[in-house]
Image: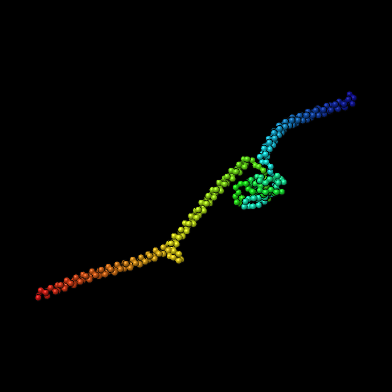
Amino acid sequence: MHIIGKVCAWLIVILAGVAITLTALMAQVRNSWAKKTADLKAQCETSQQELAEKQQRLRELEKELARITLDWNEYWSNVQVDILDPKRGMIRAAVGPDRGIKQGQTLYAFQPAADGKGTVFVGPFVVDTARQGQCGLRPAWRFRPGEPEKWRYGPGWRFRAAIPTATLAVFRDLEVAFALSDELLDAKQRYLAAQQQLKQSAQQHLNFRLAELHGTDQTPGLVQALEEEEEARNELLVQVDLLRRRLKQTVARLEQLRAENQRLAQQLERTALPTTAGR
């Protein structure tokens, strides 16, 4: 065979081996891409399903947000608040008619929370005065002295034109509970005052009785008088006892003298009888 034919034969064998190798690699790559394509297709279908579910959830949340926003109505955020009259709980807010505030309107106030996260409901306020850039508000609930001392003045307050009925009902229930507690506290305080008055009267009566018993700097007391009377009585008893003893001794002496007299009389009679008989 010619040498060129041999070279071509070997070249064909080599190329055939390379072709077989490349064909195997191509089949492996094709299978890999086919698997990736199937996986991506399944993942795409799953993602489309999740996307549809999340879009549905988004629409539901948007409806819920619209419903909640409707209940809360208009609001004013990050409002500066200062105290006007602490005895009446009146405050001044840096928001006025230029932002839609009207005199006589009821606003629901929220103050910054103690930890700086969110706000805390304070209560409803009625707009007493409204002018450019500010308004004066007074509490629209049963105000209690000392409450303004617990409010955190400054920026960060929020006012709303309305709040949900359920939340307002909870606030009213608490207000009724506070009113009942105030009435109970007032009744207990009046009862305590009456008891204190009775105690004071009893103490005065006790002091009077003690003065009667022990006396004062000006007048002696019953105890001293009784002690003096008891001492006088004891002295009298001693004197009476002494007189009784003397009387007893006198009676004994009298009896003794009487007996002696009788003896002497009898003796005289015996000595006188013979003389009379001799005559």
Image quarter hosting the N terminus: top right
Residue lying farthest to the left in this orientation: 279
In the picture, measured across the screen, residue 108 lies left or right of residue 18, that is: left
Estimate the x, y position of residue 162 in percent, counting from the top left. Answer: 66, 42
Q: Nearer the viewer, residue 217 or 9?
A: 217
Q: Nearer the viewer, residue 60 or 222?
A: 222
Estimate the x, y position of residue 51 in percent, counting from the top left. Answer: 71, 33
Q: Nearer the viewer, residue 32 or 13?
A: 32
In the picture, measured across the screen, residue 85 lies left or right of residue 17, that is: left
Q: Is residue 63 above or below residue 141?
A: above
Q: Nearer the viewer, residue 175 or 269?
A: 175
Residue at 71 percent across and 34 percent down: it is: 55
Residue 118 seen in the current view? no
Q: Quadrant of residue 64?
A: top right
Residue at 46 percent across and 66 percent down: it is: 217
Residue at 64 percent across and 52 percent down: it is: 85
Residue at 57 percent across and 45 percent down: it is: 177
In the picture, measured across the screen, residue 180 lies left or right of residue 129, that is: left
Image quarter hosting the C terminus: bottom left
Q: Is residue 198 above or below residue 72?
A: below
Estimate the x, y position of residue 2 in percent, counting from the top left. Answer: 90, 24
